[in-house]
Amino acid sequence: MKAFIQKWGITLYILSLSGHLYGQILGDKFITLQFVTKALLLPILILFIIAQDAFVKSPKHKWLIIMALFGSFLGDVLLTYPDYFILGMVAFMTTHIFNIIFFSKIYGPSQPRSTKLYVSTLLLLLFCVFIYFQLKEGTKGNLIYPILAYMVLISSATLMAVHISKQDAVKIIANTFWIPGMLFFLASDAILALNKFNWAINSPIKNIGLLVMVTYGLAQLFLVKGFQVYFSQAKK
């Protein structure tokens, strides 16, 4: 079983993601297919990471990754139900918190910073401001504030991925996998929020959910592949 997951884990993930996208295209009559295939995504990735030979001998902070992926699994399930939007968002917040802690174990916030980090900070700050003004009219009550807090948190995780790219030992991994992964995560969540609180109200976009899931699926895939390479490197 372990060898099977090692060899075919990513293929199973892509098949499950493809099944979910196909279910979306087919429509609400295939809601069960959509739910099952989406719920399988993160368990497949968790098993794939744990099955790696290098995972066993990796540093103890490896479990932060499992907790981060489990938070995403809970978020995937909870966001299936509109009434659990806040709980789903909280679940994904735990994902970003654990990722931030994981990245800080590699190269802490107090370590020397790069110009790329300062530029990225400015861009992401402007991004959060943009999201705020796009969503504030469509959100009810004070919902805009937890959404904004979430955007700040995911932006912080992205900045940590940028920050650790200054460290030579993980520079290639960060630039190839973790930074693109976090940018896809940002894109997915931004599209989801903009659609739910703006576009769906003012000008609905057909099949926008496909773009949300494609970017989200790529985000998790890039991050996990980065973790796999990192653990293999740490073993050596």
Image (spheres, grey):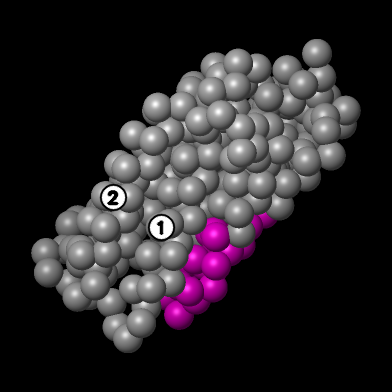
Residue 190: tell me if it is visible. Answer: yes
Q: Nearer the viewer, residue 120 or 205?
A: 120
Q: Nearer the viewer, residue 154 or 65?
A: 154
* Mark 2 secondary-structure assignment: helix
Question: Which residue is drawn at the image coordinates 20% and 65% (left, top)?
Answer: 133
* Mark 1 secondary-structure assignment: helix
User: Looking at the picture, which amino acid does disc 1 mark?
Assistant: Met
Q: Is 61 left, or right, of 197 in this rendering?
A: right
Q: Give the class, few, some or many, for how many residues have Cα within 10 Å of label 1's Cα (few <14, many ≥20).
A: many
| Residue 3 colored in magenta in the image | no
List x then y, in percent, for residue 156: 48, 48
Residue 30 found in image quarter = bottom left
Question: Which residue is drawn at the image coordinates 61% and 59% (left, top)?
Answer: 94
* Image quarter hosting the C terminus: top right
Q: Is 79 left, or right, of 25 in this rendering?
A: right
User: Looking at the picture, which amino acid does disc 2 mark?
Assistant: Phe
* Mark number displayed over residue 151: 1
Residue 44: tell me if it is visible. Answer: no
Specify the farthest residue to the left. 203
Specify the farthest residue to the top. 236
Specify the farthest residue to the bottom. 141
List x then y, in percent, for residue 163: 52, 33
Q: Nearer the viewer, residue 24 or 84?
A: 84
The residue at which mark 2 appears reads as 127
Q: Tell me how far mark 1 sits from mark 2, CA to CA.
A: 9 Å
Q: Which residues are magenta?
A: 70-93
